[in-house]
Amino acid sequence: MNSTASPPRIVPSVLPADFSRLGDECRLLERAGVDRIQWDVMDGVFVPNMTMGPDVIASVRPLVDLGFEAHLMVEEPDRMLRHWVDAGCEIIIVHAEATRHLHRTLDAVRELGARAGVALNPATPLSAVEHVLDGIDLLLVMTVNPGWGGQRYLASMEAKISAARDLIARSGRDIELEVDGGIGRGTIAGAARAGATTFCAGSALFRERAHLAEEVTALRALAAQAAPGPASHDKDTKEAA
């Protein structure tokens, strides 16, 4: 079964969390019913911001049962892949722009026992992953330029999401299609309509700490309502072919 038929997944980024009580924040997310947690790893080189290291993630790992994904916004990610897997991340997402030999990097992630993901910046075409789909478990289409939370959603990326959905369908592989950046009540339907099934939200969730479970439920419902049905997807795939 292709991932386009999967129910919507809500994956919060902890970038806007209170880092002084990160464990409590992650427990709060778990109680709210999110599907897993994304850790935004930034090195101050690939993007201007800097965030957490693997020791921080490892310290939270025993506190929740949720899956972890590491979104590596770093140069030369190959040097540090094992650190994030050892910290407890089941999915490792690298940027196509950050590695010279992407296929080799994806193989290395899988050899470590993790699922391999690739993220594409807004300006990066889908052709960057077209010939490595056999090594990809997750494709992340950035709907902002990475580096900071709270940015405005780029609706122009919806055409790219739709093209990614069709590329995945033609591949015959069960590749999860995720979007990240500016996702909230006003934008999630557009991304879902285009074909995304996993939605990384940060600021929109943490603004609603007092009503976090309700916000997660609302986002999931909006995505489910907007998702293209099987008939629409089959039609789009045939037209693309």
Image: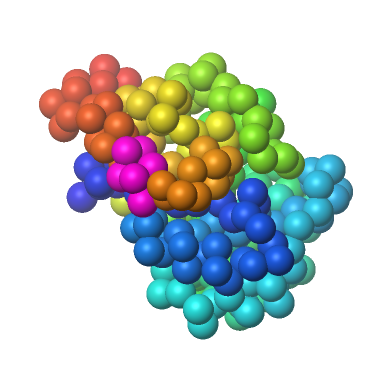
**Residue 100: percent from the left, percent from the top?**
74, 50
Above or below, comparing residue 76 to residue 126 in the picture: below
**In the foreground, 6 or 168:** 6
Q: Quadrant of residue 36?
A: bottom left
Majority secondary structure in the magenta region: helix
Q: Is residue 101 above or below residue 233?
A: below
32 relative position to 205: left or right:
left
Say which residue appears at 63% left-offset and 72% top-offset: 57
Q: Quadrant of the C terminus?
A: top left
Q: Is residue 28 left or right of residue 196?
A: right
- Which residue is pictured at 51% across the width and 19% down the height? 155
Q: Which residues are magenta?
A: 213-219
| Point 64% across, 35% down: residue | 150
Q: Picture coordinates of residue 137 (x, y %)?
A: 43, 55
Give 29 or 12, whichever is nearer the viewer.
Answer: 29
Q: Is residue 217 magenta?
A: yes
Asked if residue 138 lies in the magenta stretch, the reply is no
Residue 211 is situated, as x and y percent measured from the top left of the image, at 41, 47
Badge count? 0
Q: Quadrant of residue 74?
A: bottom right
Tell whether 192 sits left or right of 11.
left
Q: Name the residue rendered at 27%, 27% in the picture.
A: 226
- Can residue 49 be seen in this snapshot? yes
Residue furthest front in the image: 210
